[in-house]
């Protein structure tokens, strides 16, 4: 504790130098946290967990909503398959199938079916009834609304489709927050795929353990139909369909590593300079009876403080940035909201602390082992 | 007669300097009774600082016996020596060597950070030390805001705050005007007489040496005694 205070005082000694070091650390940790936020956001939609119960039925060998076409009349058949709890046909219209930051996704669903299938949808503005009453009405996710600056009563146009915002919805499922729900027949006509054709079915199974067996049963049922299906757990579907996005985000991992290496080098250099510039003073502390351990700790604390103060700033800035910006990545009609969360924040802080410690190990060792007499005589 | 506070027998210290072996102290013996104020003189390079560092335990002898306060510190490990130093020795440098970013108060407090004293207890001790060196009103000043003489008094306060029995001073007045030097010498004299500290002071200045109880000359690795009357300080 006493040493920590001393270390803190030491940092204020070369204000500009400490500030520059911390600014560099902050920039590096900002980048690291940005990358981690993307990785984490992707993981939450692609990492399959044991309690997942949603399946996506897609046209076999198709990867874009524009080309996946399935007959709507599959619905009653799917509902009868053992283990299926509920199912909903969805028509998807998207302005851009490639990986993009500005993607608009329409999801057409049978209006009477939406709330039953998706009971945790919460209407935060406007009303559900207004959506039911007009065929060209849309319920838009809150991220989508924020990004576009839309509120109930507004109209907007995308992919050649004009809609009226009836309400804004919030859902525990991040996908829902980034799309516009419209009535299925309306979208089928407006997007010219024609009535009776949908992009996919989303199916809920009654028991997570039966996810795979129900998926096989569905595909088996339509195997010899004109439009065979490929059914996967929702997260696997996401991982396989939004391939470009997954690869892109996977690549950013290297940027994160690079940022970490840069921070390490920066702090190590700063702490080494500190130790070099303080040879005599360290010798005086040693003369007073400060042990090697204490000298080493003093140096390490300075490194850790530099890492933690700079890193904390960078991490907090990154978290605030993504909170405020609400970026959404889209690919093949699927959207990924880049949202920061507490684990990313904590991870950033722990990494900053460890980097500070790691960077000061060698300088601390150097300081602790310097010979007292020679150092006292040093200029 | 009780054993001396410092007992040095056949002390030798050599340094390797490239291919050469320098031996500034050769077979040196010395006794210093408890409470004595001893001045060490001698030409430059005669080994005064080397001897002082050995007695203060910041260096170890090549051979010989070095007993301080009944402890043969020549045989202590480096870690044990560090600990011993923090309890028993106060070191006063020629150039004060205060930590520039710390106030006078905080500089004096440094040795106490190595003890288990509470903050409040440390405060009492530091304030007492500041009083003793007549700098109570400068507690919050940084070293750069003090004169040389004041800096040296802070350094003395730092050397005595943890109440060591041995004070070593390497040319403590070497960098001061005669008035400041006089104040420092009176202070050391007082620490010896009133507080019973054993003091070893290296000096080039005969007037400074006159403040001590006894003066020894170091020449060619050996000590030559030359007692002086310790009646009047400079
Ligand atoms: N760490 C060291 N390594 C090598 N040689 C040293 C070391 N310390 C001292 N010496 C040598 O030992 C001799 C005595 O040095 P010392 O510093 O004790 O002299 P001194 O009497 O204090 O001189 P001065 O009056 O100039 O301070 C010198 O020749 C010096 O070069
Ligand atoms: Mg010397």
Image: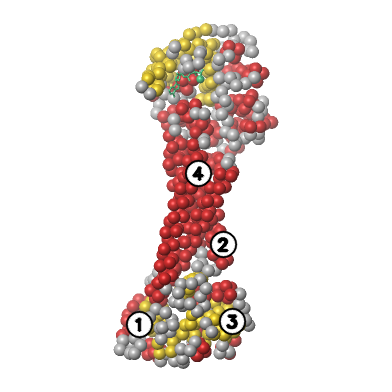
Q: Please, which chain is the residue tagged with disc 3 on? A: A
Q: Residues within 10 Å of mark 4 (few under 14, many from 20)?
A: many
Q: Are marks 4 and 1 on the same chain?
A: yes
Q: Which residue is mark 2?
A: A320
Report the residue marked by disc 3: A156
Question: Looking at the image, is mark 4 or mark 2 earlier in the sequence?
Answer: 4
Up the image or down, A171 lies above or below B186; here it is below
How many numbered marks appear? 4
Disc 3 to disc 1, C-alpha distance? 33 Å
Label 1–label 2 contact, CB within 8 A: no
**Picture layout, residue B92 above or below residue B112:** above
Foreground: disc 1 or disc 2? 1
Disc nearer the start of the sequence (3/1): 1
**Disc marking residue A145:** none
Subunit ID for the residue under disc 2: A
Secondary structure state at the residue bearing disc 2 = helix
**Mark 4 lies on residue:** A270
In three-dimensional space, the C-alpha distance between marks 4 and 2, rounded to whole angstroms, equals 28 Å
- Name which residue lies at 49% across and 42% down: A271
Marks 4 and 1, how far apart at CA: 57 Å
């Amino acid at each position: 504790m006493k040493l920590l205070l001393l270390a803190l005082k030491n940092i204020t000694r070369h204000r500009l130098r400490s500030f520059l070091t911390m600014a560099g650390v902050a920039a590096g940790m900002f980048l690291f946290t940005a990358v981690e936020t993307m990785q984490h956001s992707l993981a939450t939609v692609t990492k399959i967990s044991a309690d997942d119960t949603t399946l996506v039925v897609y046209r076999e060998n198709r990867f874009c909503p524009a080309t996946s076409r399935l007959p709507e009349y599959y619905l009653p058949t799917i509902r009868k398959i053992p283990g299926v709890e509920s199912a909903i046909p969805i028509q998807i219209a998207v302005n851009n199938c490639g990986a993009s930051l500005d993607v608009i996704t329409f999801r057409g669903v049978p209006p009477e079916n939406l709330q039953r299938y998706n009971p945790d949808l919460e209407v935060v503005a406007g009303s559900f009834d207004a959506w039911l009453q007009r065929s060209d009405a849309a319920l838009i996710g809150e991220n989508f609304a924020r990004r576009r600056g839309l509120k109930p009563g507004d109209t907007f146009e995308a992919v050649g489709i004009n809609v009226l915002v009836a309400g804004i919805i919030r859902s525990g499922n991040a996908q829902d927050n980034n799309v516009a729900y419209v009535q299925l027949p309306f979208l089928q006509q407006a997007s010219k795929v024609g009535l009776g054709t949908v992009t996919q079915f989303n199916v809920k199974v009654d028991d997570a353990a039966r996810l795979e067996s129900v998926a096989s049963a569905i595909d088996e049922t339509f195997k010899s139909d004109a439009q065979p299906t490929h059914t996967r757990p929702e997260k696997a579907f996401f991982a396989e369909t939004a391939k470009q996005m997954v690869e892109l985000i996977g690549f950013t991992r290297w940027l994160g590593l690079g940022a970490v290496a840069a921070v390490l080098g920066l702090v190590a250099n700063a702490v080494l300079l500190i130790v070099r510039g303080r040879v005599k003073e360290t010798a005086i502390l040693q003369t007073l009876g400060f042990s090697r351990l204490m000298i080493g700790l003093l140096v390490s604390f300075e490194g850790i403080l530099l890492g933690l103060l700079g890193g904390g700033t960078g991490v907090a800035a990154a978290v605030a940035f993504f909170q405020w910006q609400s970026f959404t990545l889209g690919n093949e009609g699927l959207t990924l909201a880049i949202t920061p969360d507490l684990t990313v924040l904590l991870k950033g802080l722990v990494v900053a602390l460890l980097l500070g410690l790691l960077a000061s190990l060698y300088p601390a060792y150097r300081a602790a082992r310097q010979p007292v007499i020679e150092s006292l005589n040093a200029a | 007669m009780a054993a001396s506070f410092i007992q040095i027998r056949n002390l030798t210290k050599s340094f390797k300097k490239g291919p050469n072996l320098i031996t500034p102290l050769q077979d040196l013996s010395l006794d210093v009774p408890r409470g004595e104020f001893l001045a060490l003189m001698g030409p430059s390079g005669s080994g005064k600082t080397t001897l002082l560092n050995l007695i203060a335990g910041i260096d170890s002898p090549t051979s010989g016996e070095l007993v301080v306060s009944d402890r043969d510190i020549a045989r202590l490990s480096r870690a044990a020596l560090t600990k011993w130093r923090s309890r028993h020795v106060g070191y006063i440098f020629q150039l004060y060597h205060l930590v520039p970013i710390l106030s006078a108060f905080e500089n004096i407090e440094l040795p106490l950070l190595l003890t288990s004293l509470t903050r409040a207890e440390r405060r009492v001790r530091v304030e007492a030390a500041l009083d003793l060196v007549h700098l109570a009103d400068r507690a919050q000043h940084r070293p750069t805001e003090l004169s040389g003489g004041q800096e040296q008094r802070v350094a003395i306060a730092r050397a005595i705050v943890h109440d060591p029995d041995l004070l070593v001073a390497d040319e403590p007045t070497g960098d001061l005007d005669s008035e400041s030097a006089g104040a420092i010498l009176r202070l050391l004299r007082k620490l010896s007489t009133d507080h019973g500290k054993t003091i070893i002071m290296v000096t080039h200045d005969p007037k400074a040496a006159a403040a001590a109880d006894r003066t020894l000359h170091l020449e060619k690795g050996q000590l030559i005694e030359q007692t002086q009357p310790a009646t009047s300080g400079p």
